[in-house]
Amino acid sequence: MLSDFLKENSSWEEYVNHKFVRMMIDGTLPHENFRYYLIQDAKYVEEMLRALFRASALAPIDKAIKLLSVILTTRDKGLETNNYLYSKLNINQEEIKSAKMNDINYSYTRHLNYWAERSWELFLVAWTPCMWGYYEIGKKVVQSNDDLYKAWASFYSSDDYKRRVDIILENLNSISVDKDLALEIFNRSVKYEIGFWDYALSMK
Amino acid sequence: MLSDFLKENSSWEEYVNHKFVRMMIDGTLPHENFRYYLIQDAKYVEEMLRALFRASALAPIDKAIKLLSVILTTRDKGLETNNYLYSKLNINQEEIKSAKMNDINYSYTRHLNYWAERSWELFLVAWTPCMWGYYEIGKKVVQSNDDLYKAWASFYSSDDYKRRVDIILENLNSISVDKDLALEIFNRSVKYEIGFWDYALSMK
């Protein structure tokens, strides 16, 4: 399957077992870094959805409708979790709005939008590492003894979130693309994800 | 309100009280014409959704998510109605796929996609006549004594469909646009709708 080929030939382990993830699991990650991460993530999600809508206009319409429906109807738990974390960490929408995207976040979201404007198939490839990786990460971090990290991971390890990953992988594995190009795009996203954690550790 | 201004200064009555509509109400419309219309409409909806997704990428993200969620979660009754009508009239997906868009349908959907690529606000303006007009038409046609037309109208006069119209008008009335340009775009859509009925009568 395409998904397995891409994962196995990318820097996947470096992404899902990143120091940031390990520190969430063992509870040693300072909340300050997590707070920085959450704000960058909120800005990421907005641009990621924009790219998804754009790419959907290029997709076979039935596939686009199904996938968008799953993404939009499984948002509630994620929003609830975010609101809980925002209240615990004193984050409000104004702060998210006024925060600047860091360099890796900016580059990553340009990359997603670039492919979204060109190809539904290649957007799927670029988008998969984010959605799929967070499920794997959520499954690990949900065992953290830090309540905030546990709460964060409860969404990404949930059945609702799994429905997202399942339909994305189903779509990814139904397309035909040039494997080399797909791997390049997939691995760029994986490397952006690694950079996303790096930046959240250094708070650059 | 912008919506009232646009409706009052357009060819609205000619659209919602078109001969095609009156013949659905009094049951004199031949099923052959209705069948022709349904196939063209199926082709229209696909391109209309494509335009909606495209425009959503340009919208304030919260508005786009809300509107898309309403559109996608109120599709079931419409699909059910269509499947009933398709089975009664012996229409299948292959026939829809292989049918050519008539000239007005082609022009109308290019018009929608043109604005969808340029502006969320002007796409809303171009899109509203279709969604809003069908609610008014549905309310009239649901009293038809022809079971097929009654079934068709049962979706467009439903509460689910009204939720769509409400959120579209709410969005439309919250934007600020050049009124003259908005009226031109709105009225072009109204005139395309009139042409859509004309073509369904003449089966050109």
Image (cartoon, coloured by chain):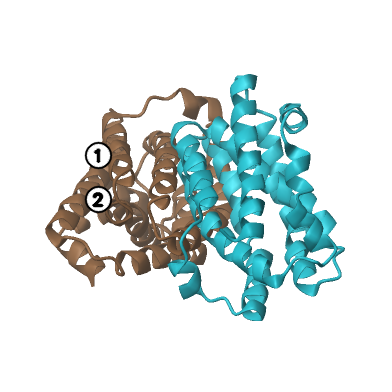
Chain colours: A brown, B cyan
Graded by Cα atoms within 10 Å as few (under 14), some (14 to 19) or many (20 or more), the crowding at tag 2 reads some
Identity of the amino acid at label 2?
Answer: His
> How many numbered marks does the figure carry?
2
Above or below, A52 relative to A60: above
| Label 1: element kind | helix
Q: Is A18 in front, or is B45?
A: B45
Q: Is B149 in front, or is A201?
A: B149
The chain that hosts pointer 2 is: A
Graded by Cα atoms within 10 Å as few (under 14), some (14 to 19) or many (20 or more), the crowding at tag 1 reads some
Above or below, A66 relative to B51: below
Q: Is residue B74 visible?
A: no
Picture coordinates of residue B161, whole percent (x, y): 72, 55
Picture coordinates of residue B144, whole percent (x, y): 85, 65
Q: Is residue B183 visible?
A: yes
Identity of the amino acid at label 1?
Answer: Asp
Write down the quadrant of residue A174 in the picture: bottom left
Rendered residue at 38%/24% (across/down): A100
**Left or right, residue B53 beside residue B173:** left
Picture coordinates of residue A185, whole percent (x, y): 20, 50
**Left or right, residue B96 beside residue B75:** left
Rendered residue at 66%/33% (across/down): B172
Mark 2, residue position: A18
First-in-chain label (2 vs 1): 2
| Label 2: element kind | loop
**Quarter of the image containing the C terminus of chain A?**
top left
Whether tag 2 and tag 1 are in contact, CB under 8 A, the answer is yes
Q: Is B78 in front, or is A166?
A: B78
Rendered residue at 59%/56% (across/down): B72
Mark 1, residue position: A198
**Left or right, residue B111 beside residue A17:** right
The chain that hosts pointer 1 is: A
